[in-house]
Amino acid sequence: MENVEKVKQLLVVSASPHIRAKKNTSVAMRVVIGALVPALAYATYLFGTRVLIITGLSILSAVGFEALMQKMLGRKITITDGSAVLTGLLLAFNLPPGVPWWIPVAGSGFAVVFAKQLFGGLGYNFINPALAGRAFLMASWPSLMTKAWLEPVGGTLSGIDGITAATPLSLLKNPENYGDPQIIISQLNDIDAIRNAFFGKIGGCIGETSVLLLLLGGLFLLFLKIVDYRIIAGYLGSFALLAWLLPTKGSVLFHLFSGGLILGAFFMATDWVTSPVTTKGRWVFGIGCGVITMIIRVWGGYPEGVSYSILLMNVFTPLIDRVTRERVFGQMPKKGVKK
Amino acid sequence: MFSRFAGGVHPPERKDTSDSSVEVMAAPKKVYVPFSQHTGKPAKPLIKKGDEVRIGMKIGEPDGLISAAVHASISGKVVDIVDHPHPVTGMSLCCVIEGDDTEDWVSDLQSDLNIEGLSKGQLLDAITQAGIVGLGGAAFPSHVKLSPPKGKDIDTLIINGCECEPILTADHRLMMEQSEAVIEGAQIFQKILGAASLVFGIEDNKSDAIRIFRDRGVRVLALKTKYPQGAEKQLIKAILKREVPRGGLPMDVGCVVHNVGTCQAAFMAVKFRKPLIDRIVTVAGDGVRENKNVLVRIGTPVRDVIDFCGGYTGKPKMIISGGPMMGIAQYADDVPVIKGTSGILVWNEITTVEPGPCVRCASCVDACPMGLMPTEIYGLVSNKKFDMAKEYGVLDCIECGCCAYVCPSAIPLVHYFKYGKNEVWRMSKK
């Protein structure tokens, strides 16, 4: 018996399984951050070191607010898990490069304090914190958020020659404010303008300019299975289909490459916490995002609809999960049929 | 290649002992033979303290419909009938036999019977008498599986040679070394069931075993290696594309699944009247000096098996009875090897991670081979909403561990589901 007592003290007894895959939350966060770095570096080249200051402030304040809130709420401080860093980074990616320094601080504050920590912290927030922060800023300081554009190095804000007052999407929305609508529309849909959008020789929010770099990062995440292909395919697929069907002045390629679509589809709609967990639900979620984005672009008051579409679908996520439950193995199609 | 069940994972296989032939471990000084080594009611003791027993003597008889006989695995004297640590149930009534260093068998062991002319009933009786249970791990009494009720026609007998648990190679070695006995055992099962076809399901990481069985002329399906291929329902789905209905049994879709080890044991029971008194166990891990496959008498304390393998290499942190995915971590090394013990893992190095919050990444939903939503059930169970957990299918969980294996937040999901199942069962009993 003595021997038994000795070994008892030594052995660890835990529920099976006794081995685990290597993937863990903070590693995944770090990989996502890594996948965004090329786009950040390119934005710094386009708009200058100001980008780094805005992004740095955004990240620092997100982490700071996270630590502060966790301290106040008596929670374990988990700022090293990378989730606050990612929130700060994504918020910065959604800001015009010319915003004053306090904008990212206010946005990160709202994102972390209200959207995330007050709902229970990581895993419990029901909307994407970065997008909630952006929506808060849009509602509070609309003119700063829609006018503080900077002209990119080696290109123009609009992606076409001669117009430096509007981004491609606002140009598409109200071409008559900037000249002959017909000429502007045809210039926007011209292959040169689309190429500029793809490679990122246009203005826009810090992180949304280079479709190419975002795609590379996004495909990397897809390859590592950190993001779900169903959400991305559902989003881009339904979006492209509507861009083709709906009465819009932009071509399908123009719509795909402009605004924050690629950033949103690969990096924000795919947020683990705020998207459905069921396989069917992820399709529904992605398609919903695509439909709402396009509706806003065509009929909405804003030129761009990516962030609001994702926020709206975030709200629907619990409902989607409930109505798209997985089919349990051995579950018969209809109850009572085989009896 | 066949891979037709949804979900599942593919952990590193680490089957390092797949080339090491089975070594026979001599009878230990003392064995602790539990009366409960199977699913169902414990066997009824037939001996009392002080009785002399010989190898193969029946010491416990089946009690009720779902139960199995147990036999003395060494020759000697019953020194006690007491509660003793048990690898699955924690504590269980055991027959403690002290060996007399002889290898005397009970008289009714036969040298080589002619089994051609035996009827179904005689075959089934031999299997029942020998206390054969499923050796894949669940230890369901085999004679029960072999007697489907009237109206349930069995057309296909599937023999499970998947051994999808990482590290374990006991079944693999058995298939390599005793393929004939396995096949004959399978044919005995086929005869009893009257099944028209017989299929062996073996994962493609055991190509040598697949070849041997094909050379012997039986039908083998090479299955793409994926855990939990060896789970009954998943295997049936992979091989026959049939889905066992929720809450149903394989016989509901016209098939029965038996493990290769069970086939071999049944063959020995029928041919030599040899009861189930030993089994092959994979001993592995950094905590034990020699990793190998050992033929161990039922009731041998794990400690003795480890000593046979050169002893501990250091201070063990974890001892597991079974495989790394579904095995049970033990409190002590004095638990005996029982009929369902497929492996003994001894680890000095383990990593324990603090569970984090669920981040709803849905990895568990993708991995679940039963189509469940582990994250939802986890939330329901941890909030004690057991009726909802039942509705979400907690009772369908086969505890394969895929969800917890992939969880990036290291949540011990299977632990919650076991707890949830118990609570649901308790509620329904009220």
Image: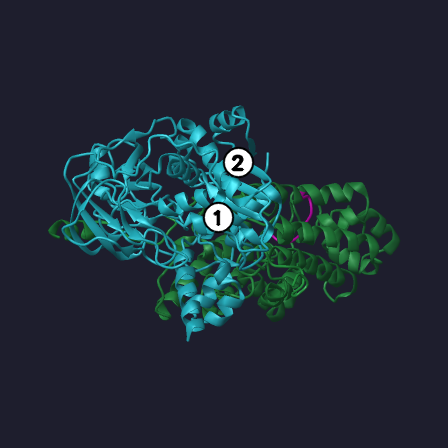
**Disc ID at residue B200:** 2
Left/right of residue A128 with respect to residue A156 in the rendered view = left
Judging from the image, what secondary structure is the residue with disc 1 in?
loop
Mark before the other along the chain sequence, 1 or 2: 1
Q: Which mark is residue B146?
A: 1
The main secondary structure of the magenta stretch is loop
Chain letter of the residue carrying label 1: B
Q: Nearer the viewer, residue B6 or A212?
A: B6
Q: How is the image coloured?
A: by chain
Which percent across, then down, holds residue A81? 41, 53
Q: Nearer the viewer, mark 1 or mark 2?
A: 1
Nearest to the observer: residue B63 or residue A136: B63
Task: Answer with left or right where residue A104 lies relative to residue A289.
Answer: left
Question: Would residue A49 be seen by someone viewing this image from the given angle?
Answer: no
Q: Give me the residue at 58% from left, 60% from top.
A: A276
Q: Position of residue B380 (x, y in %)?
A: 47, 67
Q: Nearer the viewer, residue B342 or A149?
A: B342
Chain in green colour: A
Task: Point out the stretch of residues depicted in magenta.
Answer: A200-206
**Chain B takes which shade in the image?**
cyan
Q: Is residue A202 magenta?
A: yes
Label 1 to label 2: alpha-carbon separation: 17 Å
